[in-house]
Amino acid sequence: MRILIIEDDKAVADYISNGFKEAGIVADAAVNGKDGLHLATTENYDVLIVDRMLPGIDGITLVKTLRGSGNAVPVLILSALGEIDDRVTGLRSGGDDYLVKPFAFAELLARVEVLARRKSNTFAAQTILKIADLEMDMLARKVVRNGTPVDLQTREFRLLEYLVKHKGQVVTRTMLLENVWDYHFDPQTNVIDVHISRLRGKINAGHKTQLIRTIRGAGYIIED
Amino acid sequence: MALATSSRIRSYFRSSSFQMALLFTTLLGLSVGILGYFGYYFAQNGQGLPNQEVMLWLTGLGIVFMLLVILTSFAISTFVVGRTGHIAATAKSIMDTGDLSQRISIDSRWDDLGYMAEILNQLLARIEELMHGVKNVSDNIAHDLRTPLTRLRNNLETLQKSAGPETADLCENMVAEADRLLATFAALLRIARIETGRQRNQFVPLQIDAVIRDVLEMYEPVADEKNIRITAQLEPASYHGDRDLLFQAFVNLLDNAIKFTPDGGTILITLDNKTFSIADSGPGVTAPDREKIFERFYRTEASRNTPGNGLGLALVAAVVKLHGASIGLSDANPGLRISIAFR
Ligand SMILES: Nc1ncnc2c1ncn2[C@@H]1O[C@H](COP(=O)(O)OP(=O)(O)OP(=O)(O)O)[C@@H](O)[C@H]1O
Ligand SMILES: [Mg+2]
């Protein structure tokens, strides 16, 4: 995976670069919009991480320019402001995901991995999703594990679907809130954990292997 | 002293009472003058007392003058009352909306009311400037402290990776503590942004009942863990508002209800005629505390050992105000009832 970081704040850029280095991922860096745009158009990257406020060309203009020239590389926009309408303009300009500073590196990494693999994700057309000995029938909205039907409510089904569609990847609590519940808010309590533990209870009951692992300080993962 | 007196005299000449007095005196003088002239005229002609016809004329003229005086004073008073009413209405609207950018429209500069309006507008401008300063300072504090705090947090995280198991645990706790502080700053900034009203561009048509249903679906498992039963009676209600912020406000209210209600309690949520209400069977809030719990960081003595930092209801209040709705607290016997009237 190759990543380009376009960020003028050196502390943030270093924090991200070091994080990727530890995770064994190569990351290039640009400190202004002009250099960033040049690199993005001449090199091949899997994901761009773009700060919203940049000297020269700002992040939003940069993404618009890229999209205008037919470049579809996944872009994650970083912002220090965190206003909701920022998110909207960020995503409207062609950004694929949006993260508010300050963030934990684990959150960024999880999102970048999801973005990088989106191209090769072929789940969209599949009607049966499989993970280990569990099967999800997307048309009939039924779940079977090792031959035994599992009775899930609508939201539990969507939660499981999101996890399975990102199998082998860490999904964070915020990602689940945004994608499974479709509200941008601060949950006050560990409400996601409660939903996950319910889901676990249902799909793991009577089975030896436990599906859905907790990754400390990051989120959840479901694996084969 | 002399200056004050002279300015007082000057302002008297500009005042509407002075102008009214001037008008009355002029009209009175005019009528006396006319009557006097007639008297003089008749006396000159040696006729003694005027005859009946002339008397009738004089009476008619007197009545006309009186009516004129009444009409003018009425006109002046409506003019004055209308304008003081306008000043009061502007002041009230500023208090209701908290929008300090409003000004009293000045239609004249030469009389005392126009002068007063001008001074009041200067006062408003000054208040706005000061308020803006205070808001900016607290906004900036929260904003500026976030950067070093983030750096601290990130360095701790790096340290954690290279540390032995004991130090690593300590680092993890410190990272969590820093995250809580950052979350508090974020919440403060969020409230500040909602209060400036800039978020109204996110308003969309929505169903309040649907938003509440989503909140319930999300938090029912949390209530289940405490064996709290939630009953909801929701009537459909179409509305124009910010979906995420309304969701957040309902979440904060339900979170409080679940948090403060003991195990096995009940929560009743209703939406009736665009009025939302949530009542719990917890300890409630004493009357003196009721006005304070919407303040930032205020927590009652009884809730010191529950988690939280007292920003939940401040955000609810900001969201309610942004939507032009009103919020009220009452006793649910036992417990607390919070109602929001959306209009
Ligand atoms: N349902 C309730 N029953 C009893 N007391 C309440 C209830 N809701 C709020 N309060 C009181 O009002 C205070 C302020 O509430 P608020 O939601 O603003 O803060 P918090 O819940 O303590 O913290 P936070 O919401 O930031 O996690 C609470 O600390 C509590 O004392
Ligand atoms: Mg609260």
Image: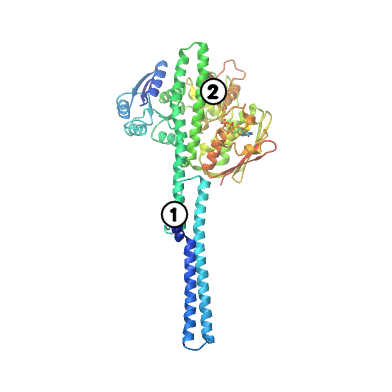
Amino acid type of the residue tagged 1 in the rendering: Ala
Residue indicated by mark 1: B2
Asked if the residues shown at circle 2 and circle 1 are in contact, with their CB atoms under 8 angstroms apart, the answer is: no
Residue indicated by mark 2: A135
User: Which residue is at a point 49% across and 76% down the rendered structure image?
Assistant: B32
Q: Is residue B148 visible?
A: yes
Kind of element beneath mark 2:
strand
- Judge whether A215 appears above or below B7 on screen: above
* Residue with the most extreme top position: B164
Locate residue B11: give its quadrant. bottom left
Check disc 1: other Cα within 10 Å, few if <14, some if 14-19, many if 20+: few
Q: x, y (%) of residue B36?
A: 48, 79
Q: x, y (%) of residue B331?
A: 67, 39
- Judge whether A211 appears above or below B195 on screen: above
Q: x, y (%) of residue B52?
A: 54, 86
Q: Is residue B282 left or right of residue A172?
A: right
User: Which residue is at a point 42% across and 24% down the rendered structure image?
Assistant: A112
Disc number placed over residue B274 in the picture, else none: none
Q: Chain of mark 2?
A: A
Kind of element beneath mark 1:
helix
User: Which residue is at a point 54% across and 23% down the rendered structure image?
Assistant: A135
Check disc 2: other Cα within 10 Å, few if <14, some if 14-19, many if 20+: some
Q: Is residue B251 visible?
A: no
Locate residue A195: give its quadrant. top right
Locate residue B325: give its quadrant. top right
Rendering quadrant holding ligand 1: top right
- Judge whether B275 appears above or below A213 on screen: below
